[in-house]
Image (cartoon, rainbow, N blue to C red):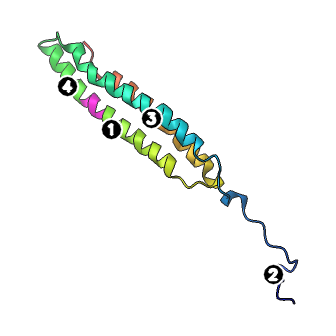
Amino acid sequence: MSANSHAGGNGSTPASDPAHAPDRRAWAAPLIATVVTLPIGLIALFIGGLAPMACDSCDGAAADRFDASFTTAWTVLWSGLLIALAVLIASWAVPHQLRYAARRVGLALAAPATAVVTFVAFMALVDWP
C-alpha cells in the first residue's frame, strides 16, 4: 500500500455531507422576519400606549373595568412582544448550515406571527368602553 492511499482503498477523499455545508442564504429569513416583526411590535406598543385615552371620559364602574382589563392586557402585550423578540433573536442564532434551514425559517415565521397574535390578544383582553 502506498503512502498516499486512504483507508477507503480507491485513493479519493470522501465527499463531505451536504447537510453540514454552509448556507449562503442563511441571513435572508431572519432579515425578512426582522423587517416585518419590529414595525409590527412598535405599532402594537404605540396603539397599546394610546389605548388608555379611549376611556378618558369614563367614570365609575366603566373606568374600573377598563383599568383592570387594561393592566392585564398591557402585561400580555409586553410579554408576547418579548417572546417575539426572543424568537427573532433565536432565528438569527441558529447555525448557518443547510441542515438547520427549516428550523431557521420556522423561527423566522414564528416571530411576526407571535407579534400579531399578541396584539390581537391585547385588543381582545381590553374591556373597551
Q: Earlier in the sequence, mark 3 or mark 4?
A: 4
Disc 2 and disc 1: Cα gap in Å? 57 Å
The image position of residue 92, as x and y in percent, is 50, 48
Whether the residues at callouts 2 and 1 have beta carbons within 8 Å, the answer is no
Q: Amino acid at mark 4?
A: Ala
Disc 3 and disc 1: Cα gap in Å? 11 Å
Disc 4 and disc 2: Cα gap in Å? 74 Å
Q: Which circle marks residue 68 in the picture?
A: 4
Disc 3 designates what residue?
114
Is any part of residue 109 visible from this angle? Answer: no
What residue range appears in magenta? 72-76
Give the number of the mark in front: 4 or 2: 2
Q: Residues within 10 Å of mark 2 (few under 14, many from 20)?
A: few
Q: State the quadrant of the C terminus.
A: top left
Disc 1 designates what residue?
79
Look at the numbered disc 4 and give the secondary structure of its residue: helix
